Image: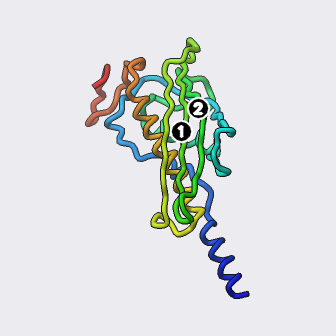
Amino acid sequence: MKNILIILFLSVFMLAGCSTSVNNMIPVLNNKIFNHYNKTITIGPVISNTPHSFSDVNLDNKKFKEAVYFTLKKAHIFSKVIKKTKADYQLNIKIKAQGLRRESCLTFSFALVVSYVLIDNKTGHEIWHDTIVSCCKKTVSDSLIGGTRMNMAIECAVKENLRKLVKELSKLSVLSVRRCLPYDGIEVALRGRE
């Protein structure tokens, strides 16, 4: 009986964990390397292709949309990230594939494939699209608790995907006029790309 209780406790300990956190999905960004445009953006609904999910554990669409929102806001690529009203651009998001894989009883990997489409709201035309793939592995050295490792792998893959998204959006040549940025207390108008 004592052995059964020990096994039960260890099983719960290895699998228990909190749910994913939006704050842990937002990448650390160096704003100095990004272009900053005098345009506004809103984020469309996140669509998920569940048939292409290769595990039972999936990323929550609402949390992913929040992570995109806060990442774009933090990156300052656009003059404003708008939640509800119409903006200059809309970023449409489709999670094409996602999945958690247990590589061993102590290691989890999460892969994420997201398609992004930037739409000009004035014309309705697509001005940019890309599919970004990210993957992250977490081991027992990251956390002893299995559920926590699983969530850490998901959050890490999202963070890497969003870091790549910000990098790609900041390179867009169709958004050539950059907004005024404060530099040592002086407003400097920057135009074009560096």
Q: Is residue 60 left or right of residue 36?
A: right
At label 2, counting other C-alpha atoms closer than 10 Å, the crowd grade (few under 14, some 14-19, many 20 or more) is many
Q: Residue furthest front?
A: 104
Mark 1 vs mark 2: in front: 2
Question: Can you give x and y, in whole percent of width and height, for residue 127 in the image?
Answer: 49, 18
- SS label for mark 1: helix
What label does residue 68 carry, if any? 1
What label does residue 4 carry, if any? none
Q: Is residue 147 above or below residue 36?
A: below
- Amino acid type assigned to the residue bearing label 2 in the image: Ile
- SS label for mark 2: strand
* Label 1–label 2 contact, CB within 8 A: yes
Question: Can you give x and y, in whole percent of width and height, for residue 141 in the image?
Answer: 45, 66
**In this figure, which colouring scheme has been used for the structure?**
rainbow
Residue at the spot 52% in from the left edge and 27% down from the top edge: 41
Q: Residue furthest top?
A: 123
Pointer 2: what residue?
A: 93
Q: Where's the C terminus, which quadrant?
A: top left
- Amino acid type assigned to the residue bearing label 1 in the image: Val
